[in-house]
Amino acid sequence: MEQEPMRTRTWQTDATHPDVAVLAEAAEVLRQGGIVAFPTETVYGLGADGTSEKAVARVFSAKGRPADNPVILHVGRRAWVDHLVREVPTAAEALMERFWPGPLTLVMERGQRVPDIVTAGLPGVAIRMPAHPVALALIRLVERPLAAPSANRSGRPSPTRAAHVARDLAGHIDGILDGGPCQVGLESTVLDVRRDPPVILRHGAVTREMLLEHLPAVGEHVGGGAPPESPGLKYRHYAPDVPLEIVGGPPAERHRALKEARRRLSAEGKRVAFLVTEEAQMMGPDVYLLGTDRDPATIAASLYGHLRTADDSGYDRILVEGVEESGLGRAVMDRLRRAAEAPPGRD
Ligand code: TXA
Ligand code: MG
C-alpha cells in the first residue's frame, strides 16, 4: 500500500570525519522506528532498527520490495554477531578478522532473536560490518544492528550518491544522510559460510581471488535460477525500461563492434547510450565513461550512476562495454548480465 508522502530530512556530513551531532539526530530517528538512508563503502543502504519487525516492514514498503527477499543486518562490532546467530563457523572467524569492517556479507545460522521479516523466514541470517565511517558511527550510536537493503526503489540500480536515493525515495523515508559518493559502487559479496567450502551467493568487492587467500576452497552457485539459500537472486537488481546490451569479446574486437554499432544505429535514427571504457576511445554526448580497463574498480565505481542517467534520459537502447571477468570484473559482469536478461522479476 502506498504511504502518504512524508517529509524526508537530509543531513550533510563529512565522509571521513562524521559530524557526531548530525549522526546523533539520525540515530534517534532510527531508535524511534524511523527509516533513514546512509552511505556505506559499497552503496547507500536504507536502514531500520533490525530488532524491530515494524521498522523493517517500513523499509520493504518504501522500496516496494518483495517480502520473500531477506535483508542484511549491519553490525557495529564483531561481538554483536554472537547475539544474532546460533554459532559462528570457524571459517567465518578468520574472514571477519580479515575483511571486517568491509564489503563482505556472511550468511550464518540465524539466532532466535532475529525477526522473521529480516530473513524472510529463511534459516540463515546475512550479516556485515560496513567500512564507511558514517555507517559505522551511526550503527554504534543506535546500538542495534541496522537492517539495510540498498536504498533504491525496487528495480532501479543501487544508489551510489544521496541524490540517487532522493530521486527514488524522497517522500517515503524519514531521512537521508548525505556523506558523498560511495567508493566501491557495487554491493557487497554475499558468502554462505554454513557450507564447507563456503559458497559465493553474490559476487562483490571482496573477490573470489581475495577469499581464496584465506580459505582452501570457495564454492559458487552454478546453473540457472536462484539458489534456494538466496531468493533475492531471482530478482533482477536492475531492470532498465529500455533494452540493455553487453558488447563483449577481446578489447580490440569489442571496441570495433561498439563503433560499428554506433554507425549502424545512428543511421537508423536510434538514440543509444554508450557506456564504455577510456580504451574504447569514443567521444560525444551519448558516451558515458566507465573508467579504465586497467582498473576494474574505476568501472565498478561509475557504473550505477551512468545506468541511472542513461535510464532517465529517454534513450532507445543502452550498449555497455563488457570487461574481463577476473577480480572485481566478475561482479561488474554479473550485474550487467542480470540487467540484460528478460525480466523475471524485480528487486
Ligand atoms: O553492499 C551491500 O550489501 C548493500 C549495503 C547497503 O550494505 N546492501 C545490499 O542489500 O545490497 P540488498 O538487500 O540490496 O541485497 C542483499 C542480498 C540480496 O541478494 C538478498 O537476497 C541476500 O543479500 N540476502 C540477504 N539476507 C539473506 C539470507 N538470510 N540468506 C541468503 N541471502 C540473503
Ligand atoms: Mg538491492
Image (cartoon, rainbow, N blue to C red):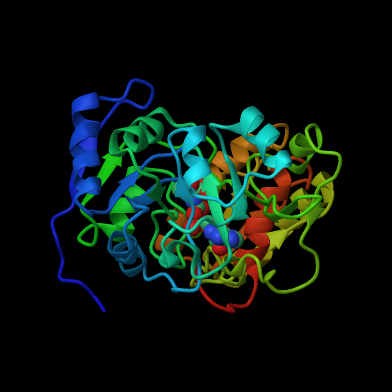
**In the rendering, at what x and y percent does residue 199 appear?**
75, 54
**In the rendering, at what x and y percent does residue 259 appear?**
70, 54
Tell which of 44 and 114 is nearer to you: 114
Q: Residue furthest top?
A: 17
Q: Residue at x 19, y 46 (%)?
A: 29
Q: State the image quarter where residue 10 is shown.
A: top left
Total count of labels: 0
Q: Residue at x 36, y 31 (%)?
A: 134
**In the rendering, at what x and y percent does residue 209 appear?**
79, 38
Reply above or below: 121 against 10. below
For the N terminus, the image quarter is bottom left
**In the rendering, at what x and y percent does residue 167 appear?**
30, 56
Q: Residue at x 61, y 52 (%)?
A: 108
Query: Would residue 110 be seen by someone viewing this image from the given angle?
Result: yes
Q: Is residue 327 left or right of residue 283?
A: right
Reply above or below: 279 against 146. above
Query: Would residue 305 be seen by someone viewing this image from the given angle?
Result: no
Q: Residue at x 72, y 40 (%)?
A: 90
Q: Is residue 39 left or right of residue 198?
A: left
Reply above or below: 240 against 19. below
